[in-house]
Image: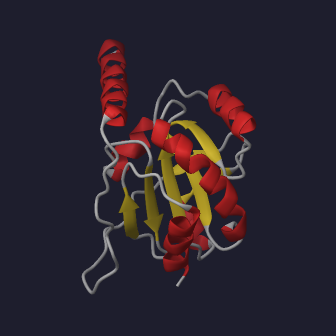
Amino acid sequence: MIQIKSISILFITFSLFLAACNSEQARKPTAPTETKLEKAPHFEVTTIEGKTVSLQQSMDENKPTVVYFTASWCPICAKNWPVLTEVYPEYKDRLNLVAIGIDPTDTEEVMRNLSKEKGFTFPITKGHPEIMLDFGVKAQATTVGINRDGEIQFQKNKMALSAEEYRTLFDELLN
């Protein structure tokens, strides 16, 4: 059983590495329409600072949630970190954001060192590949916006976004 789990983790890590090598492509965001939006899967994580973040907590606070799936070695993620560091403080009182590591080798120590080195202002976790799979996300550098009702309002895959693009997405969640 342990061998199967180890092989599965290695396969997921290798798949994520291959996905990182692909060109930057965007999946069209899921825009709110008259059709019912997909419910986000429940998640609960502990940040490297020891704070618990969960979908239920966000819904209880009546706040939208942004989940950013990241990896310490991801070149596209590295382009988004400074932008999230710039934009997050403007929105931290109105929405919850958490960067969830997707690589099981991104331990709490690895992510703490990365956060310190890069000066992150946003909450980040160690690697939780199972949460990425629960969301149906296939690659790092994916931003998922969840509205106050716990529904996925948008998903931006493998994209480096500008500060204005993040502000637009965050404002759409808030309105």
Image side of residue 79 versus residue 13, left or right: right
Depth check: give the residue in front, 45 or 122. Answer: 122
User: Which of the 4 quarters of the picture holds residue 108?
Assistant: top right
Q: How is the image coloured?
A: secondary structure
* Residue in front for this viewpoint, 89 or 150: 89
Residue 161, x across and y down, in percent:
49, 58
Q: Position of residue 109 (x, y in %)?
A: 67, 26
In the displayed structure, would residue 24 be above or below residue 92? above
Instruction: Count how many numbered circles sit on residues in the image.
Output: 0
In x, y percent, where is residue 160?
Answer: 46, 52
**Quadrant location of the N terminus?**
top left
Compared to residue 27, the image places residue 137 above or below, namely: above
Relative vertical location of residue 77 with respect to residue 6 in this rendering, above or below: below
Tell me which residue sits at (58%, 67%) in the image. Answer: 58
Q: Is residue 49 left or right of residue 63?
A: right
As drawn, which residue projects farthest toward the left? 35
Residue occupying image coordinates x 57% and y 71%: 167
Name the quadrant containing residue 133. Answer: top left
Query: Which x, y percent locates residue 33?
Result: 29, 83
Nearest the viewer among 6 and 158 is 158
Q: Residue furthest top?
A: 3
- Seen at 55% across and 79% down, the residue is 174
Q: Is residue 69 left or right of residue 120?
A: left
